[in-house]
Image: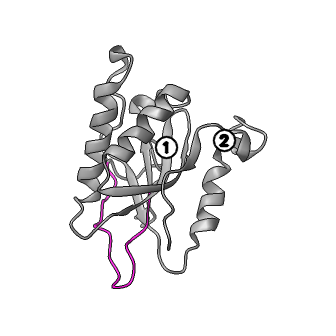
Amino acid sequence: MNNQSPPPCGSAARRRNQPIHLAPIESWDRAPLVFVTACTAHRQPLLDHQLIHELITGAWREANEWQVGRYVMMPDHVHFFCSPVSAQSRALEKWMQYWKSLVTKRWPDSHLIPIWQASHWDRQLRREENYDTKWEYVRQNPVRRGLAQQPEEWLFQGQLNELVW
């Protein structure tokens, strides 16, 4: 059996039904930095609208036990980097459920609910990985998908907090 993680969000090459969510490992000198991908239910293209962009970023600000750093919202999924605010912050899985529920409760079109896939994909960055290099790959997603000529043209991206790593 192949030990590689399956591609995120419903890929045909998937080898297991649900992602494994390991607790972030904290170092004595820094909080963990986690890369997350959350997909819409049935890969519905719902997220590339200004109102939805504001709704999601508002939920992240309100669900403030974890800080969201850089992010890119694609039509059917969102990639972001996050880090717990303190050692007492709720587990990533619980925090994800919380902010997704905030978004769902405030969603403008109730007939589109459920909005999110039940789970998400997460991966803690390791010391040898470069946050800037990973970010550059993520911000190129709209270009690779033909949604923008340059990453800067894509409106649904940004940074809420500076995550130092």
Q: Residue at x 44, y 41 (%)?
A: 57
The Cα atoms of the two marked residues, 2 and 1, are separated by: 11 Å
Q: Is residue 72 visible?
A: yes
* Relative vertical location of residue 1 with respect to residue 59 in this rendering, above or below: below
Describe the colour scheme in one phrase. Answer: one colour
Number of the label disc, if any, that sits on residue 142: 2
Residue 101 at x, y percent in the picture: 27, 36
Work out whether 49 lies above or below 33. above
Q: Amino acid at mark 2?
A: Pro
**25 or 59, which is in the foreground?**
59
Residue 109 drawn in magenta: no
- The answer to whether 22 is drawn above or below residue 106 in the figure is below
Instruction: Characterize the local packing of mark 1: few (<14), some (14-19) or many (20 or more) Cα atoms within 10 angstroms.
Output: many
Q: Is residue 142 left or right of residue 17?
A: right
Horizontal side of residue 4 vs 16, given as left or right: right
Q: Position of residue 156 (x, y in %)?
A: 58, 38
Question: Which of the 4 quarters of the picture holds residue 5?
Answer: bottom left
Mark 2 or mark 1: name the one nearer the start of the chain: 1
- Which segment did they paint magenta? 18-35
| Dominant secondary-structure state across the stretch colored magenta | loop
Residue most extreme to the bottom: 28
Looking at the rendered structure, the secondary structure element under dot 2 is: helix
Q: How many discs mark residues in the rendered view? A: 2
User: Is residue 53 shown left or right of residue 134?
Assistant: left
SS category of the residue bearing label 1: strand
**What residue type is disc 1 on?**
Val
Residue 12 appears in view: no
- Residue that numbered label 1 is attached to: 78
Q: Which residue shows up at 34% across the image and 57% down it?
A: 66
Q: Position of residue 28 (x, y in %)?
A: 33, 85
- Image coords of residue 87 (percent x, y): 25, 70
